[in-house]
Amino acid sequence: MTQQDKNVERAAALDTATLSDALDRLGIAGQCHLVKPRDSAYRMTGRAYTLQYGPASTPPGTVGDYIDDIPPGTVLVLDNGGREDCTVWGDILTEIAHRRGIAGTVIDGICRDVSLALELGYPLFSRGNWMRTGKDRVQVESVGVPVNIGNARVNPGDILRGDADGVIVIPAEHEAAVLDAAEAIDAAERHIREAVRGGKRLDDARKDLGYHQLQTRTR
C-alpha cells in the first residue's frame, strides 16, 4: 500500500468536523460550503476525479460520458458552478458508479433521481436535488482540472471526505499535516470524553486538554 492510499484510510477514520478543525488550525480552506449528503447515513472517502461544467454552447455539447473510465475508490467531483436550475447527475450514472465501486459523487450544484441512490446506498453530496435535466443547458468543459466545490478548491488527486455534516477536501500537498493535526484533535477530544465519564468536570477536562484552542490557527 502506498503512503497516499494509507492517507485515504486515515481520513476515513476521522469525521468531517474533526478534519474541519484541523484545516482551521493550519489555515487551509477545505470546507465545501452548502454541499450536503442526500442521506445522513452516507459516508465517503477517496481521491478526486474532477469535471468542470459550463453553459451549453450552440449547438450544445454533452454532460459527459466519462463514467466507464473512473477507477474504483475514486470520488467524482463535478463543478456545475453551484447551479440549482439543472442537474449533472441522475440514475444511470448512479447505477454504473455503484456497480463500478466508485466511492461517491460530490456536486457543486444539484442532482436528480435520488431515490435510486438511497436504495443502493450510493453516496451523493450536492447543494440539493431537482428533476430538470442539464442536457442542452450545460456541458463538460474540462476534465482533470482544478475545480471549485462550495468555495473550496479541489485538485485531481485531493482526498475528499464526506459524512452527515458535509464534505471536506484535503489538498494533496498538505494531507500529511492535516491528518496529523486531525488525529491529535481527535485524541484530545476522546481524552476529554473519557475524563468526564470518569467523573471529571467538563470545564476542567477541556482546560487540561486545551479544548478551546484545538482549532486555533498555528501557521
Image (tube, helix red, strand yellow):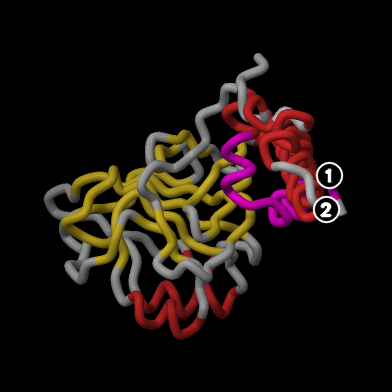
Q: Residue at x 73, y 55 (%)?
A: 13
**Mark number displayed over residue 20:** none
Q: Position of residue 78 (x, y in %)?
A: 40, 52
Of mark 2 and mark 1, the one earlier in the sequence is 1
Res 100 → quadrant: bottom right
Q: Nearer the viewer, residue 156 or 218?
A: 218
> In the rendered image of this protein, does residue 91 appear above or below residue 165?
below
**Which x, y percent locates residue 1?**
87, 54
Q: Is residue 208 left or right of residue 25?
A: right
**Label 1: element kind:** helix
The residue lying toward the viewer, choosing from 188 and 88, is 188
Quick one: which residue is furthest to the bottom in this view? 119
Residue at the spot 44% in from the left edge and 65% down from the top edge: 124
Residue at left 42%, top 49%?
Answer: 51
Label 2's element? loop
**Closer mark to the observer between disc 2 and disc 1:** 2
Which residue reaches farthest top? 219
Residue with the mark numbered 1: 3
* View extreme (right): residue: 1
Residue 21 lies, in percent from the top left, at 60, 35
State the residue at coordinates (16%, 56%).
85
Say if residue 173 shows up in the picture: no
Q: Main secondary structure of the magenta part?
A: helix
What segment carries the magenta color?
2-21
Q: Nearer the viewer, residue 203 or 3?
A: 203
Q: Nearer the viewer, residue 136 or 105?
A: 105
Q: Quadrant of the C terminus?
A: top right
Question: Label 1 is placed on what type of residue?
Answer: Gln
**On the rendered structure, is 130 left or right of 175?**
left
Kind of residue sitting beneath label 2: Gly
- Give the residue pinned by disc 2: 198
